[in-house]
Amino acid sequence: QVQLVESGGGLVQAGGSLRLSCTASGRSFNNYPMGWFRQAPGKERIFVAAITWNTLHTYYADSVGGRFTISRDNTKNTVYLRMNDLKPEDTAVYYCAVGRQFQSPTSTTQEYDYWGQGTQVTVSS
């Protein structure tokens, strides 16, 4: 059974940093793109960042570019999201997701087949 488990969320002051982790179990996703999305209360889930299966390319939403960094360790079946200079508008539940084998990552939720349960990130002003 495939399972994605996120961790690393929490409460942080504006300007602070957090690192989220997402570890997959049940199968290897080394050949799959992986992404991070977030969902604020009352809003739809939106794209944050993604990384290709071979780590050569990364993609970011305009709102987080220059502040967030996505990375992955295929030996650990884990993807990370380093978040710096956090802002109150970054407050949301953050989800990791797995895309389609060997395909380029996209910003569309429908292109991701496996999802974690989410981890809450709250940024106070």
Image (cartoon, rainbow, N blue to C red):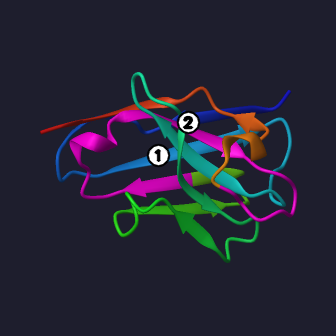
| Front position in the image: 7 or 38 | 38
What is the secondary structure assignment of the residue under circle 1? strand
Q: Quadrant of the C terminus?
A: top left
Neighbours of disc 2 within 10 Å: few (<14), some (14-19), many (20+):
many
Examine the structure image and report whether residue 79 is included in the region drawn in magenta. no
Q: Quadrant of the N terminus?
A: top right
| Front position in the image: 75 or 61 | 61
Q: Is there a contact, CB below 8 Å, between mark 1 and mark 2?
A: yes
What is the secondary structure assignment of the residue under circle 2? strand
Examine the structure image and report whether residue 103 is included in the region drawn in magenta. yes
* x and y percentages locating residue 46 in the rendered image: 52, 42
Left or right of 27? Residue 53 is left
**Numbered circle sitting on residue 33:** none
Q: Residue 71, relative to residue 110: is it above or below?
A: below
Determine which residue is flagged by label 2. 6
* x and y percentages locating residue 68 in the rendered image: 40, 60
Cα–Cα span, label 1 and label 2:
7 Å
Instruction: Give the residues drawn in magenta, as a range.
Output: 80-106
